[in-house]
Every structure is written in structure tokens, then in C-alpha cells.
Image: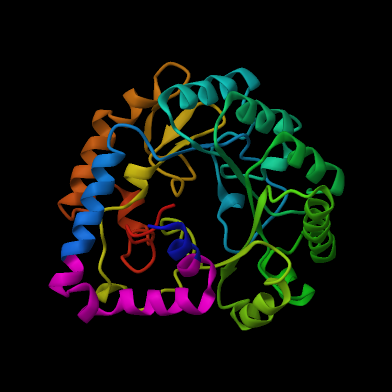
Amino acid sequence: MPRGIYDLVIYNHGVKKLAASILRSGWFVNNPVYNFFYRRRMHDQMKKYEKIPFRVMVENTNICNSKCTFCPHETMKRPKGFMDKRLFEKVAKECKKLGIEYFTIYGFGEPLLDKDFVKKVEFAKKLGLKRVTTNTNGELLTKDLSEKLINAGLDEIYISFDAATDAAYRKVRPILSFQKTEKNIRDLMALKQKLGTDKPEVTLSFVESNTNRHEVKKYIKKWKDVVDNISISIIHNWTGKITSQMSNKKNLRRDPCRLLWMDMVISWNGDVPLCCNDYENKVILGNIKNESIPKIWNGKLLRLTRKEHIDGNYSVNKICNQCEYNFHYKSPWWIGK
């Protein structure tokens, strides 16, 4: 998808809502002309990333400083820790060798808790990885850290900030500071302007739920002329762990999940789970400490899961069976930049 069209659909809330509404329409998704072009796009993408993933997501830590109401992190039972520097560098070097340009340093935790985070960004950029990104809740993003990340060469940063007011923020992220995070965001943007740089590209991410939906318009008005992008997304059920806020799911179409062809997730200890929604690592594809990216990506378990999705069998495992991510309107194969 061309970057301009992608940005319009992803970052313009009105256009995004309209697109989602159209894709929820049974008449539209059952249209043979639409399906001809959609299937062609899907098959082209599957073929393109069958051997090597589009993106590698490196979980530098799964420890978090927040207790977000829409996130199951508090219930996570797998061991917590930080990725060893040598393992991180091994993964980054392999990505460079394989030509994987999209490299995200983030997993199921707050990446800025990692004392070596700046060094890891700097290593990835000096290695020559073209698109190095991260996601953060922003509370730890001090002015000093922002300057270090700019100097390290970070390309994109997605800041999860889900309210326009302190009152609403306390309901979705109860132990974080609204005022502190807002100041950090504004300081980062001011610093970019002062240094005359357009990187990192700053996207504010707003997870829309019944708790904060009333603030979306106010939020967009408040931030649209401050940051580079605003992304409004709908809360999902984290493979059944969070109560679903989707209605009439029985009437919605499901497609083979993009994540099985696009994103490889590498946990802090080297384990490679099925996807980013498998936060407990219930389905392990391999471990990067003793296996290569291509070997894991072309392994028997992932190939079997892909085939089951293509055949329309989403009950192949509990992760996929309970997940909402692959509903057509939520994550269609048109997405990708």
C-alpha cells in the first residue's frame, strides 16, 4: 500500500472509522470484485514473506511500570527479565544479514526500563538497520532520554497515551502520571524542532474502549498539530483474556492472520512465540539462541498453523481460536508500509 494512502487510513480517525465500517459490511466483503483484488493482495504478501518475516520484534524486557486496564500483563505468568546484550546483538546482526529492515525493540513490557535501551538502539542503527522503532507509555521518556534516543538514531516511537484528560487517563492507566507523560511528549517534540530533525517520527496511540471513547474527538483536536501522527485503535480481547467489546462477531469474516507471515516476535529469553498476541508464550516456535530466523520461520509448527488458517480452521490452537485480531475489518491484508 502506498505510504500516503496508508497514512490516511491509519492516522485519520474519520477515514479509519469509515474503512472499518465498510469492511464490516457483509455486502462489501462478499463482493466478488473486491475479493478478487483482496485475495491477490493476500497471496502476494504471503509469498513475499513466506521465507523471511517483514518485521522482527525484539522484546528487550517484559517488565512493566504500568497496570493498564485493557492489558493482561498483571496476570502474565511467564518469567520476567531483560534481554542479554549479546543475544540482542546476535539477533540484530542476523536481521541485517537477511535484509530485514523493520526492527522493533519492544515486547510485552515497558522498553525504557532497560538500562541498555539507548545502547541497543544505537547498535541497531550503526549496524545499518533502516527502520528501528519502539513503543512506550511515555512516563520514563525524560528530556535527557529523548535527546539520547534522537542522537542514537531511533526512527519511530509509538507512545501509548489514551486520554485527553487526567480523569479519563486514571481510569485506563491508573498508576501513571498524565501530567508527566504529556510533558514528556511535548518536550520530545520541542527537542526535535530545536535540533532540526524529523526523527524519531512520533505517533500517539490511543486504545479506544468504553472507558475513554468520549474523549477521542477532544484528543485528536488537542494533539493533531503537535505530534507527527495519531493512531486510534479499538481494544481487542488478547486471545480471550480481556472481555471483548466487539458485537455480532458471528457475522464478521475472518481471514488468515497477517501476523503469521509478517512479524516474528523474539522474547527476552530467546523464545519465539506464535505471535505478539501470545503474551504467555503458550505456543513456542523455537529459540533464537540455537536456531536461525529462517529455520524458525519455516519450521513445521508455523507452516502447519498457516495452512490451518488458509483452510479456515482457526481452532488449530486456543490462541488463534479466541483471538479477535484476524477479523477482516480489524487487520486486513491491505495494511502494510
Residue 125 is drawn in which quadrant?
Answer: top right
Q: Residue at x 25, y 55 (%)?
A: 41
Residue 262: image location, x then y, percent: 37, 44
> Does 248 appear above or below 292?
below
Name the quadrant of the N terminus: bottom left
| Predominant secondary structure, magenta span | helix
> Does 89 appear above or below 2?
above
> Does 103 appear above or below 233?
above
Is residue 243 in view from this perspective?
Answer: no
Q: Residue at x 41, y 56 (%)?
A: 239
Q: Is residue 172 magenta?
A: no
Depth check: give the residue in front, 331 or 167. Answer: 331
Count of marks overlaid on the render? 0
Q: Residue at x 21, y 38 (%)?
A: 304
Q: Which span is picked out in magenta?
A: 8-35
Q: Is residue 34 magenta?
A: yes
Depth check: give the residue in front, 19 or 111. Answer: 19
Residue 185: image location, x then y, percent: 77, 58
